[in-house]
Image: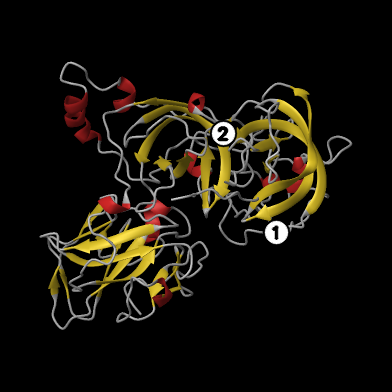
Amino acid sequence: MRALPFALLALALTLPACDDSSSGGGGDAAPVDAGGLFTDAEPDMAPDLDDGVQPDEGVITPDATPMDLGDLPDIAERDYGMMNPLPEICTNPPAPPVPTPIDPSPACGRGNTLRITDLRDPRCPEYERLPTQPPGRNVTLRGVVLGVFDDFNFALQDADGGPYSALFVYNQREVPLDNVRPGTVVEVRGQVIEFFTLTELILDEGGLEVLGDGPLPEPVVVANPERIATGGDLAEILESQLIELRGVRVVDTAPDCPRDFGMFLVEGGLRIDDENDFDYVAARGDMLETVRGVLHYSFDETKLFPRGAQDVTAVSCGGVPDKCEAEECSAPEGAAETGELVITEIQSNPRGEDTEREYVELYNPGPNAVNLDGYTVEDCAGHQAALGGRLNAGEYHVIARSRDRDVNGGVRADGGMGELFLPNGYGSVLVFKADRTLVDQVRYGPEMPWPAREPGQALILQSVDADNADGANWRAADQDYGDGGQGTPGRR
């Protein structure tokens, strides 16, 4: 199994998104807007860190559906008993931590040899765009190991840290790493590529030399997980570095249903991946006192990879894991559908905040109006959105994260999405009547026959009469509807 990248960084700086087994390679940074925030446009352009990046204010934004704390007493009664109330941290979370400051000035050319920062920071003279597949750029680098994954691959960082100071080392020949552990100083030789936007060094045969053990750099403390989640303004510059979060809540334990990639979601939309098979079983509502891991990118998502059980300190708040077994989905694939409504558009990866800008479009193909009262839209994990009102023949009904067009990216929505969750990769959308009769369902994915999409592009059914279970009948949207991306919500 091909391991994923990880690395750590000791920053002294001020800068204030089945089998997920592929490794990835680092990516070019996104541009900075007038306010200093990294944007989604032109990912190959370098951010102007010299202009500064907005302070990590530590505000945990609603990038995932918040827990309804009003339900917790009942859960506590069931799981803890009346005499054992929930731990205080569950109902009184700690204040966000003080984040590690990040120096925005470039750290190019420090020392007599090529460093990871020189290679990755677009502002450095040694920087050059890397191939996306071998042969890559031949380099020799020296650094500190931050974590070992799958027994053969590891994250490596410049000893003094800083922005762009880490990368992932792919040990394709599976040379034993008996003397390599977090804190080990090594020299590596190999080819560097951009593997699906993750900077990765493919180790040459005989290209690893252990130089000794040194101090492990301190993790970068991030107050707001949203900033390092998929599309976050710090995700690229902190790629493959060791990150620490404190006092964050688990909001979804099955974000990829009906697939199961061994990940769960915390506030801010950040994924935590069980790449090293640590023992913690996440439950919705758990409070993570601390979680450390290497920041990695693969399968269109940025995620945190804890190195083991020691990196996760969790407090149970009485919740249970979300279901994520395909056979437990409320309807099997290929089940009979009544067809009163057709799922015609899915925006699972909008520009900006997913939890504010996702949407689903439904269409009434019949000759008569449909009373939507009692209908639900849901995923295979059981997250639901309630429908209501009347949908006339030949008209569309759009549900969105927010009905405010200034918030949702320009979508004219007819209703809300409730707890419905739309993963960027594999996902499920099912429509039911009040009596649980299946009306329609779609199981979308990132691979053929489903169309390839860039961030912001919605999935559009090419004809309302086409079989929407077949990915070949969908296309990537190419018409802007607003700041949220490209699509035609509520119209054709």
On screen, 474 above or below 29?
A: below
Badge 2 marks a residue whose secondary structure is strand
- The number of numbered discs placed on residues in the rendered structure image is 2
Q: Is residue 132 left or right of residue 462?
A: right
The picture places residue 249, in percent across and down from the top left corner, at: 38, 34
Badge 1 marks a residue whose secondary structure is loop
Q: Nearer the viewer, mark 2 or mark 1?
A: 1
| Residue at figure coordinates x 17%, y 21% from the top left | 81
Residue at image mark 1: 133
Q: Is residue 338 left or right of residue 288?
A: left
| Residue at figure coordinates x 82%, y 46% from the top left | 139
Could you say which disc has been placed on residue 243 in the image? 2
The picture places residue 443, in percent across and down from the top left corner, at: 35, 63
Query: Which residue reaches farthest left?
Result: 435
Query: Which residue reaches farthest bottom?
Result: 367
Q: Is residue 424 left or right of residue 316?
A: right
What is the crowding at mark 1: few (fewer than 14 residues within 10 Å), some, or many (at least 20)?
few
Instruction: Name the foreground residue: 255 vs 39.
Output: 255
What is the crowding at mark 2: few (fewer than 14 residues within 10 Å), some, or many (at least 20)?
many
The picture places residue 190, in percent across and down from the top left corner, at: 78, 46
Circle 2: residue type? Ile
On screen, 55 above or below 326?
A: above
Q: Are marks 2 and 1 in contact (CB under 8 Å)?
A: no
Instruction: Name the foreground residue: 103 vs 383.
Output: 383
